Image (cartoon, rainbow, N blue to C red):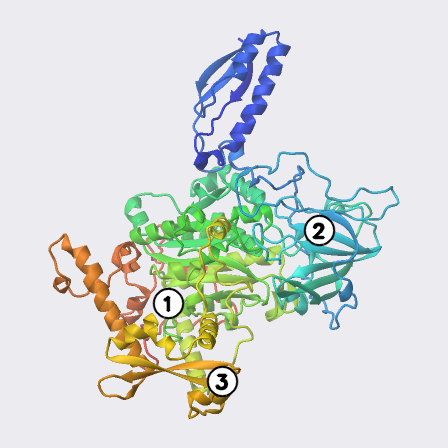
Amino acid sequence: MKRGKHVHCHCSVSSSTSDDDDEFEDENQAKQEQTEDYCQDQGVMNEDAIGVAQLPKTTQVVFEIQSGRPVPRLCEPRHLYGVSGHLSQTLSRWPKECEVTPEEIHHIDWTPPAPEPFCIPESEKWPRDQNVGKGTLVYNGQAGKEYYFTGSRPGGNRSPLSQASIPLSGPDDTTLLFEGRFESANLMSAHRVGQFDYDLMLRPDLYTKKHTQWFYFRVRNMRAGIPYRFTITNFLKATSLYEKGQKPLLYSDEKARAFGVGWHRVGYDVSYCRNGLFHLGLPCFSLSWSFVFPYDQDTCYLAHCYPYTYTKLWAYLSSIERSPRVSSFCKIRTLCHSLAGNLVPVLTVTSPSRKRGEWEAAHKPAVVITARVHPGETNSSWVMKGIMDFLLRDSPDARLLRDTFIFKLVPMLNPDGVIVGNYRCSLTGRDLNRSYNSNLKDSFPIVHAVRTMVHRLCEKRDVLLYCDLHGHSRKQNVFTYGCERAAGRQLHERIFPLMLSKNCPEMFSFQNCKFKVQRSKDGTGRIALWKLGILNSFTLETSFCGSSIGQQKGTHFSIKDLEMLGAHFCDTLLDYCDPDRTKYNMCLRELQDSLRQETTLTLAEAPQSDDGSTSGSNSSDSDGPPAHLEALQMINRKKSMKSKKQRDCSCLLRHKETTPEENKDSDVKDAAQKGKYSLKPLCVPQHMLRRGKQDTPLESTDTNKKMSVLYLVFDNEKGSVKSKSDYLRHLMAGYIKNRMQMGLGNSLSGLGLAPSTMPSGKANQLSGRGHLACGDKHIGRLSPVQWRGSKSHPAPFTLPVMTNRQGEYRPAECKRGQWRGVVKEQATEPDRKPEHVIGKP
């Protein structure tokens, strides 16, 4: 029997599944056309071809063409976990209006033989600021005109790709050909302002009007040996690491093919300054640099940092599943689907259970690490890759970590933003790292899934550490942001960062770490998950530029440096949980000594940080609801309330038309006269108010001058003037009394209870908020505040005592050697318990 092509059919049943399965509908239409062509080629009757074209659409049945006729069979279930399922599940899904080039972009990983130094930034402003925005348009890659996300499909817009670059006039035309419509790219337009001089504009994050920091685009038709000048004109940050010596990155296909050279730093005369333009009422800044292309007619890419795309992540995960050794202790699952339908993978890394394994697995503490919540912070993906490489290797340290912990790794929290080339936001047009407290599950499915996953982990086991990997665009080095309620008195939250600074002294700066819990950052993963009871909850910030300390001072971070940072992070986990508490106690005493020195300084002499912000962005803490909900509010916008200034102006206008005696019949003053207090107006010119003169009679005032109405509060019983606060308390008492009699009496009438019979304390509880209780109420653990207030401070989880086959004790320290640059203390000294208060045992 002759077997033909398969026909996969799909029917869009509901809006919740139509976007996720849109590729199957498109494949169905294409395969139906292929089936008709096949039937005609095989001489099948037209009735059969019509029957194939009109096959019922379903996701459960697959029709195979056998001997020219459709034969139905059940479709194989989708592979929900891992990457070995249908290929369409791992394809990058774009918004429907986005145009995407069909070429596959591939870059090799390369490390320079020597650290790349900073450049000397240009001190003076570039003299062509007044000509910004002028010139010949040579590239226009607008992403679409939609105001909010409406749907997605693999490959984006299915219409033919438009011509974004201007066509060349001939082989002698030296105009550069730009392209920014591929994965993670974001070039919006390019103007030619000179023969080898170009002004570029970056596309803001989709469905927003800001967040222009990350850039990544392609250039062709260049000439070698000629200095080109590029200027990006729509940055919104007032400061940047380009002012401190950072250089852009260049990738040459010819250089990679000939010499195996990947991304490397290029540029001279780098300047970052204001350019005279404004956007959203804010001044714009230009980044300008000059450089030389290495080859003629080459294909080159320029980027802000080393790109790490969604496609590259799935290629890495596919290699894990193909390895029998790694797949035995690393399971790849789907955490959830993003707003566009892209899979969000989560890796569970731990040793498989053996004898007594079920009990051991139930008591293993968990370590949760996430990355790329901000799409443009690509250095965090390279740090995550270093962590995964360390945990998956076949080394004693890696095996010890897998035997001791359960690792939950989410390598890409915002795949939609990574795919479209956003810098900070998802397709909702909002920052996901400000949405961990949001209840909009449909708008923020990923952060909701992460919060749920961590909450379930806290119910089953201890979570030793949570860390969210980020990149910083205004500071050098690597540092952390932690959570500390007691303003430096409880030092145990600082021990892990201090240990990391000792293991990685060339990159990590403990002086730049901050441990503030700001109310404006409550929506971040660091603070939201810390409130679940996780003591070590951190944000690891890695500079886009490089290091200013140690032997690597004045050099950029390479891909190898970022991956080594991930390895140092895992190395510090072993030190933090070492059964030998020498390092832990040494760091605790160092922190206590540092705190004593800081308390002896006066407030004026205390060192001040150059940047008190705990964010790498100058965006607002909350941009409001998602873009589609904001558009809906614009349609159904209600009448806005007047401000106090507007109400005062309207009061003055009414005063010009009426006399003060006529104003006494207002509702406010009538209500006041019925009570204990009353209001009496006194109109005084404003110029006399400023001088403090209020003894001028009302009849002598000039009606042409601007007047102000003062209301004095009088006690009707005593005839004395009272303060405004007494009057407000009087009004609020009456208001609360009326509300209690009306609302509370009606709500309790069905139960036969009077308001006075309510149990004490129950009236103050908000209905429908029971699920928002503290973490200790749900999971039986102390909250951060209770934990710090407890008398006995528990020691952190320690590694189990390791023995060899002969039963001899083998401490983890004996195989790890001495601490880098630190002389280990004698183990004979008895370990002291952590001190709660300085100076008290």
**Point 47% across, 61% down: residue:** 539
Residue 221 to residue 487: above or below: above
How many labels, in total?
3
From the top left corner, tell me how far across and down residue 15 is, in percent: 45, 35
Q: Residues within 10 Å of mark 2 (few under 14, many from 20)?
A: many
The amino acid on which the numbered mark 2 sits, given as a three-letter code, is Ser
Q: Place residue 181 in its image quadrant.
A: top right
Q: Dots 3 and 2: beta carbons under 8 Å?
A: no
Considering depth in this image, is 436 or 801 the residue closer to the camera?
436
* Mark-to-mark CA distance, 1 and 3: 71 Å
**Quick check: 201 left or right of 344?**
right
Q: Which residue is mark 1?
A: 581
Say if residue 806 shows up in the picture: no
Q: Which residue is mark 2?
A: 189
Of marks 3 and 2, the one in the foreground? 3
Of marks 2 and 1, the one in the foreground? 2
**Point 78% across, 44% down: residue:** 166
Of marks 1 and 3, the one in the foreground? 3
Q: Which mark is residue 686?
A: 3
Q: Residues within 10 Å of mark 3 (few under 14, many from 20)?
A: some
Question: First in sequence: mark 1 or mark 3?
Answer: 1
**Quick check: 813 left or right of 133?**
left
**Point 54% across, 32% down: residue:** 23
